[in-house]
Image (cartoon, rainbow, N blue to C red):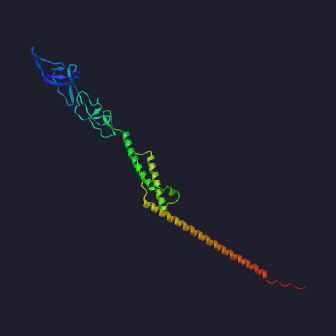
Amino acid sequence: MLCNQYDNLTGRYVASFLAERDPMDANRYLVPAFCTLTPLPEVPARSWPFWQDGKWMMQPDYRGVRLYRTDTGEPGEITVAGVSPDEAGLTEFPRPSDEYVWSDGAWVLDEAAVAERVRAAAMEDFYARMEGARQRNLGKSDARVTGKLSDIEAAMFDAWAAYQVALVRVVDSPTFPDDIVWPDEPDPQAVLAKVEAERAEKAAREAEEAARREEEARRNEAAKTASDVESALLAGDETARDTEAPADVDAK
């Protein structure tokens, strides 16, 4: 006959040993304190018998089971029988990532944490792009204001400045950071082509203006010449009239 010992405070099963017969009565067994001759029931997995109210009751037993803290996701453990993972703030399921929180008995995605991570990544991208653009124009602001840059240098400066403004507008957009379309960096070849086109347009305007002025000067010169000729003719007629002989006068 087995005698089953249990903890005097919790009732947790401790050990089994052969019961000794009562020397005064061969049909009886001696039962020490905190022991019982009641046979142990079949013990399911992750359970442990406890002597409660005169019978064996099953309590959870997660000793030696790999568990995880529901507040941090860090590994945890239970060192005594009779404590469930829920009571200890633990779970058998590992936390998928830092973006998950324990809620209603399961790991669920923390939307706020995900949104913060997405925004942080987008802002890191923004700062990197902005810093690159600033480096392009570093030390050129005063030269741009005072007109010390060449037309190509000025055009590149303005292109990178416009790029920075476009970056800020992306961040200020109500759809940021869920919907991001970063502007393209300035293309030096495209900027050069634009400058050359502006040069050609300016040269054409200047040539047109020069031709117009030349035509106007030619017309003015022709008008002046015509006026001088007319004035000379008028002056010649008056001189001829002044030198003409007086007509004969009849004598009386």
Q: Residue at x 58, y 68 (%)?
A: 212
Q: Position of residue 97 (x, y in %)?
A: 31, 40
How many numbered callouts?
Answer: 0
Residue 209 at what x, y percent from top left? 57, 67
Residue 249 vs residue 232: left or right? right
Q: Going by the picture, which residue comes out furthest to the front?
A: 139
220 versus 76 height, above or below: below
Whole-percent x, y for residue 24 in the image = 9, 14
Q: Quadrant of the C terminus?
A: bottom right
* Picture layout, residue 166 above or below residue 107: below
> Residue at coordinates 16% horizontally, 25% vertically from top-left?
15
Q: Residue at x 55, y 66 (%)?
A: 206
In the image as oriented, which residue stretches furthest toward the left? 26
Q: Is residue 204 above or below residue 9?
A: below
Does 166 sit left or right of 75 as displayed? right
Position of residue 133 measured from the top left corner of the image (x, y, whole percent): 43, 53
Measured along the vertical axis of the image, is residue 248 above or below residue 152? below
**Relative to 9, 181 lies left or right:** right
At x 77% / y 80%, what residue is drawn? Answer: 241
Where, quadrant-wise, is the N terminus in this rendering?
Answer: top left
Looking at this view, name the residue that lies furthest to the top: 24
141 and 6: which is toward the camera: 141
Q: Is residue 60 or residue 134 the one in the foreground?
A: 134
